[in-house]
Image: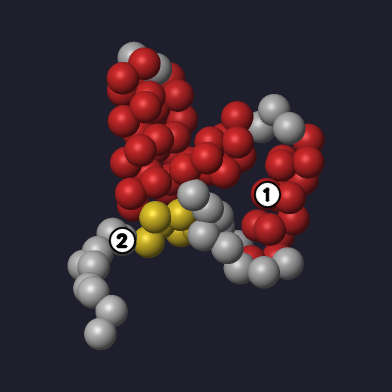
Amino acid sequence: MSVVLLDTDMLSEVIKLRDATVRQHALDYTRQHGPLPFSAFTRYEVMRGYKQQGAVRQLANFAVFCQHALIFPAGPFRRPT
């Protein structure tokens, strides 16, 4: 299994834990590579969604989830030369 960077859609599926295949892949990944990696921008998008919905409990659970994740900082962005 390759090292990955989860985008917002994939992270959302992992957080929901509804799909057994997604759940198993996430578990296998963490066993092989450690914490799930995603960007600070993905973290922002998930938090923004919970705040817009007034989902206080999900927001608190996500904050705990983030403490055990590998979150890559956003930017600075540079144009390719």
Please say whether residue 21 is visible from this viewpoint.
yes
**Side (left or right) of 72 relative to 5:** left
**Side (left or right) of 32 relative to 73:** right
Identify the image quadrant of residue 36: bottom right
User: Does residue 46 sit above or below 70 in this rendering?
Assistant: above
Location of the C terminus (image quadrant)? bottom left
Nearest the viewer among 54 and 66 is 54
Q: Position of residue 52 (x, y in %)?
A: 31, 19
Nearest the viewer among 13 and 28 is 13
Nearest the viewer among 14 and 56 is 14
For residue 26, the mark is 1
Label 2 or label 1, whichever comes before in sequence order: 1
Please say whether residue 68 is visible from this viewpoint.
no
Disc 2 + disc 1, Cβ < 8 Å? no
Q: Position of residue 65 (x, y in %)?
A: 48, 41
User: Does residue 42 sit above or below 61 in this rendering?
Assistant: below
Residue type at numbered disc 1: Ala
User: Does residue 31 sit above or below 48 in this rendering?
Assistant: below
Q: Position of residue 54 (x, y in %)?
A: 34, 14
How packed is label 2: few (under 14 Cα within 10 Å), some, or many (20 or more)? few
Q: Check the image and name the residue furthest to the top.
A: 54
For residue 7, the mark is none
Label 2 element class = loop
Residue type at numbered disc 2: Pro
Q: Give the labeled residue for mark 2.
A: 73
Query: Which residue corresponds to the image point at 37% horizontal and 27% vertical from the top-left?
Result: 49
